[in-house]
Amino acid sequence: MTCFHFPRTPLLPVLCAYILLFSCELTPRSEVPQRDKDFNDYWHFHRGDRQNAWQVALDDSGWDRVDLPHDWSVEDGSVRDSLHVGPFFKNLESGADVGYLPGGTGWYRKHFVLDNEPEERVYLHFDGIQTESRIWVNDSLVHAHKNGYTPIYLDITPHLSPRGLDNLVAVEVVNPDRHSRWFTGSGIYRPVRMSRVGPVHILPWGITVQTPVVGKNKAVVQVGVDFRSPNGSHTVSVDMEITDPLGRTFSIRGPADTLLSGTDHRVNLQAVLPDPLLWSTHQPHLHTLRVRLWDGNRILDESSVRFGIRSLDFSAGKGFLLNGEPVLLKGACIHHDNGLLGSMAFADAEHRRVLLLKENGFNAIRTSHNPPSESFLEACDELGMLVIDEAFDMWEVPKRERDYHRHFAAHWRDDLTAMIRRDRNHPSVILWSFGNEIPERALPEGLAWADTLISFIRTLDATRPVTQAICGFWDNPDLEWADAQPAFDLLDVGGYNYLWSQYEEDHALAPGRVMFGSETFPLAAWENWQKTVALPYVIGDFVWTGMDYIGESGIGHAELLSAADKPANFLMPWPWYVSWCGDLDITGEKKPQSRYRDVVWGESLVEILVHEPVPEGQREQVFHWGWPLERKSWTWEVPEGQIMDVAVYSGAEEVELFLNGRSLGRKPVHPEEKGTVRFKVPFAPGTLRATAYQMGQEVDGDTLFTAGPLDHYRLVPEQETVRAHRQRLVYVRVEACDASGRVLPDAEPLLRLGLQGPAELLAAGNGSPMADGSMQDEAFRLFRGKGLIILRSTGITGDIVLEVEDGTSTKKATAHLPAVAL
């Protein structure tokens, strides 16, 4: 294939194709149905298996009370011995895969009473349950689910008690051993919502928005509405109202139509918007679409979605165009966990993670290797982050003994449907990926599966190209790289894992192929980005990974070895529990590779990094996803005069290094050195500064200072207030500082926190890759002078007072945060 232009589908047939500006409202005669109401509070939880725990008659009054989202894998275990540390189990089988955090079985139960009308339909929406689940309503098994990442929508109406009587939802969750290559978490880790609608109602994920024509002067917005009538016949009309970011309203009402009993219908509407505000990475303008079903002047149902007006264009000649403008994808692969929170997908946590990546130069994310939470995509929409939405890490051939391969053949269709129907209105999503490093990718059965998956995806959404991430044949040495070409030929865009060296050779074989680095090594940032900039058919680079994650413990390690030592093979043993391959650590702090990437991408002109001293007789071994033992620090416990290796990374023509005002030399920045200039510097406390020059003129500089002794701790809340709601969080950074307020990069004291007011402690810890006890109690240690506290609102207003102290001195820090009404 030579070129893909999206949208590329013909205009849908429409019932109405005109615009009414600021149209008048019709007065409803009935209450608008309740959609997507919070269903997260007051669950009862039991960790471990329990016979017949789905039965209404079971007494759960002694169970733990939890509010969702919830992940029991990061909760402290009940056993305390030499093998159990906080939530960790040192002897967990394949523990390095999942960060030594056990899964198992858990039960959730929630009692509720409804004042529902006789003909009302009631839906439950689980955005994700990890990993395998069964759901009962009032003793009836209503659903069994095998994928921990795909959402679940259930019509529970037939199983409900009569109005005003007690109902029970019971959920059994099983997180099997040896089922994942990374930490998944355990439990109902994403939010749950309830919708109550009338007999005639818009179906779950029943609104589709497309923008087939996008220009500066006008945009065409096409809306498809799928709705149902379970009994009786109705004369139904459909209208839609689009509100743009400026508050302008565009309304359309279609003609009345008769909806027959028991049938699902689709109505297509179209609007032409003048002077549209387009969604982009720099200006992520979002529109709100409200769709209503009417019977005369009575509202039968109403639902809203947000969308963006934007066009996608992929071609080997021009690369990737967003709204007609070229965009190079500065990409991050990420797993789904939220660091110290485990897998819990609070909207605030998801928003923070996307914001951190955006602030550190990324404009694109690959959700490796599974669909993300809905909140995550909403954050990407709001912040202007492009997304490759990925479905599977395996098909029929396993990567771990009890992984999803056991269920793929029976459930792939439902899981792809749930992912795409939920996610297709998000403007941030630009590509569908249906696989990552699939073992059978180049075999006949794998090619047949790929063809089937691609065809099915296009029936659900043909406005985005389809990809998969393909790697070299390290897993099948009988094959050669040429054997991968048929798999690439099926794709709209080819994902290359760690294969930048193949781009030009493959382009000669397939000149129309669009390519991107779907996974790349941090140490190859220079090579990957140079190819992305130079080759129009290469549209981006996605590093593994943008942020540290739990599990695949220590794949980003660098270690000091003696002559007789053998390097670690892949994963690191206990107490490593974090991957340590991210540009950012699990708390969001920048790591050295992020500083280098800033220079590679032109976000910074100069960065200084200093290598840790390597003892005589030892050598450094950096693993594939690792980075040398560099630190952005000039505070070292070494004798004065000890030679330190200093790297100055720069995109300028020359750099000059100064120690305490004295020049140590001015050197050119040679491209063959990948933007790196190295100095040998005799250590002396004080100031180390690098100055960058362009055409002989100073253009930028970077300075490191030697920190003094510990003087105080500093609490830095990331927001000024917290909203009084159980789903709202507040992040507070903790820093150990000298008298000048500089962070002490080697300070790792044990702190204890105290908390008063309407908040509870959700997590406290640091960004170290090594486990250090509980992730949720009041005692926590700083790492390189920094830590993080995460609080959860109790749902009431008041003054939150947070205090930390180290227990060995009188040094304390206090922060006050008002919890305000929503």
Image: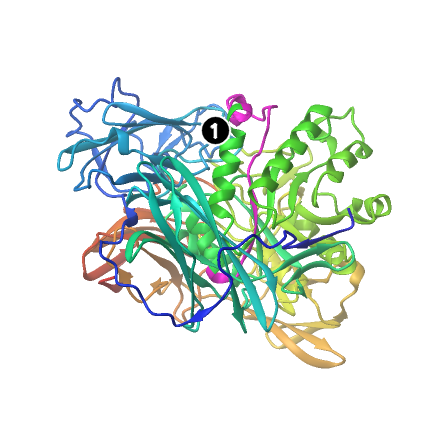
The question of residue 490 being in magenta is answered with no
As displayed, is residue 371 above or below residue 793? above
- The x, y position of residue 160, in whole percent, is 22, 31
Element on which disc 1 rests = loop
Quarter location, residue 210 = bottom right
Taking the image as drawn, is residue 603 in sight? yes
Quarter location, residue 534 = bottom right
Horizontal relation, residue 694 to residue 91: left or right: right
As displayed, is residue 55 above or below residue 652? above
Count the marks: how many? 1
Horizontal relation, residue 396 to residue 285: left or right: right
- The x, y position of residue 144, in whole percent, is 39, 26
Seen as rendered, the residue at the extreme bottom is: 697
As displayed, is residue 239 above or below residue 573? below
Q: Which residue in the structure is indicated by mark 1?
A: 95
Q: In the image, what residue occupies the spot 16% across and 42% down?
A: 115
Q: Amino acid at mark 1?
A: Gly
Horizontal relation, residue 682 to residue 591: left or right: right
Range of residues picked out in magenta = 382-409
- The x, y position of residue 246, in whole percent, is 43, 73
Question: Which residue is nearer to you in this view: 630 or 518?
Answer: 518
